[in-house]
Amino acid sequence: MDASCADELRQLAAEVTRMGGLAEAQVADAVDCLAKRDTGAARALIERDVRLDAMQADIERRAIALIASYGPSGVDLRRAVSAMKLAMNLERCGDLARNIAKRSLVLADADPTSIMRAIERMGRLVSSRLNEVVDAYAVTDFDRALGVWRRDEEVDDHYESLFRELLELMRQDSATVQTGAHLLFIAKNLERIGDHATNIAEIIHFEITGEELTAERPKWSSLDTPSTEDMAL
């Protein structure tokens, strides 16, 4: 392999890892903003989201330029393509964290519900999954990435449980409908971040092995709900 190509691939991977760290921080901070009702931190998080957008665009530009300049094949081509795919998933995690922060502003003055702590627990779980898979990418740890993929259903189970609890809460007390609706969207945003962490695990698997994960994802849901990934206030 051309030494210049190898060096640029290393730099590209380092930038993806750095972007992953920022995305992790956005998700963790979004959960903290919600838990602590910290409106100042929530507004700062919303403003920071543009950094991830810029990084995603830069990584994509650099990966395309590398492919055009060196015409890599095999694992080198997979590394370049994976960088673009990873950046896209990380950028979406940032968008979802921003959406959570926006809703936390609305909920800052709302009466707390008994389900809020369950939302926080789900947030911590999703944040840890994202942290784990980004670390797996940074050290090319195939087994660790696969472990995140295999545990995907844990996040889904949390979401389904919260969904049913929130619907029951709103059915029993109409005064909780507005708060409950915002919490439903937050729970869905967290579930989508969990999906992106699983996507990242699949990308790492492909980059290392050159093979797609053909097994069905270990997840299930009896809910027939629309995706709210792109929904914001």
Image (cartoon, grey):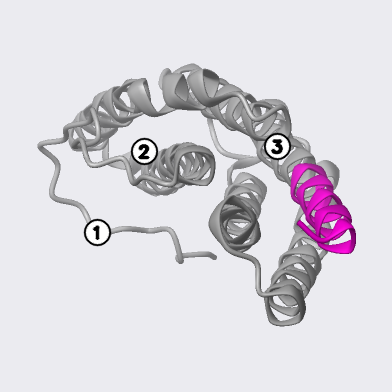
Q: Is residue 2 magenta?
A: yes
Question: Magenta span has 34?
Answer: no
Which residue type does callout 1 highlight? Pro
Position of 36 with respect to 231 (left or right) is right
Q: Residue at x 71, y 27 (%)?
A: 139
Q: Which region of the structure is painted magenta?
A: 1-18
What residue sits 78% from the left and 36% below the top? 38
**Contact (Cβ within 8 Å) of mark 1 with mark 3:** no
Q: Indicate which disc, 2 or 1, sits on the residue closer to the N terminus.
A: 2
Mark nearest the camera among 2 and 3 is 3
Between circles 2 and 1, the one closer to the viewer is 1
In the rendered view, tell whether residue 152 sits above or below residue 64: above
Q: Residues within 10 Å of mark 3 (few under 14, many from 20)?
A: many
Quarter in which the C terminus is drawn: bottom right
Residue 176, which numbered label?
Answer: 2
Of the numbered discs 1 and 3, the one sitting upstream in the chain is: 3
Which mark is first along the chain, 3 or 2?
3
Instruction: Label 3: state its secondary structure.
Output: helix
Q: Residue at x 83, y 62 (%)?
A: 51
Residue 160: x, y in percent? 24, 30
Question: Mark 1 falls on what kind of element?
Answer: loop
Q: CA distance from mark 2 to mark 1?
A: 22 Å
Q: Which one is in front, 209 or 35?
A: 209
Residue 195 vertical position relative to residue 63 in the rendered view, above or below:
above
For this rendering, which residue is in front, 56 or 160? Answer: 56
- Report the Cα–Cα distance between label 1 and label 3: 25 Å
Q: Judge whether 103 appears above or below 64 on screen.
A: above
Q: Which mark is residue 24?
A: 3
Residue 34 is labelled as none
The CA distance from mark 2 to mark 3 is 31 Å
